[in-house]
Amino acid sequence: MAQTRRRLRSSTVVLGGMGVLAAALSACGSDPDRRCVDRDSYTLGDGYKVVSDKNCSGGSSGSLGKGKSRSRSTDADWYYDSDVRNGYAEHGTFSRSEAVDRGGFGCSGSGGG
């Protein structure tokens, strides 16, 4: 009976470890968290004001050539990996590639800061 329990425990550890590994690997391939923000709305205490996603064009970081479909009332762009609080985002980046390079557990790339 004791051997049955020991096998159960070791198989549970193996299955749990595989789950952690799978989560780490799938997190690497996923897109970074992003918010559409108004670049002109930055305040020192709050960050950038989060606006509707329809103000940001495309699925990647906005560049000068992609702003044609944006609303004229805001200079909106995607802001990645930010902390969001009370409708404002801060401590992120406008560079999608930089946000991906920050990576998570198990991701390759330079994440040093």
Image: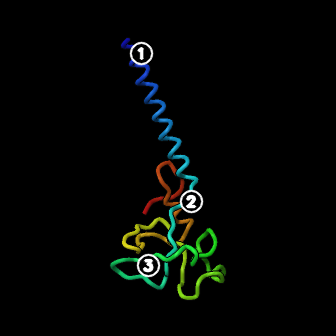
Question: Which disc, if any, is residue 31?
Answer: 2
Q: Nearer the viewer, mark 2 or mark 3?
A: 3
Circle 1: residue type? Thr
Q: Which residue is mark 1?
A: 4
Find residue 77 and report its horizontal and vertical position in percent: 55, 77
Q: Is residue 18 left or right of residue 65?
A: left
Q: Amino acid at mark 2?
A: Asp
- Which sits in the foreground, 110 or 25? 25
Q: Quadrant of residue 78?
A: bottom right
Which residue is under mark 3? 49
Residue at coordinates 52% horizontally, 75% vertically from top-left? 52
The answer to whether mark 3 and mark 1 are in CB contact below 8 A is: no
Q: Taking 46 as reference, is 24 left or right?
A: right
Sort mark 3 into few (<14), some (14-19) or many (20+) by Cα contacts within 10 Å: many
Rendered residue at 54%/84% (across/down): 75
First in sequence: mark 3 vs mark 1: 1
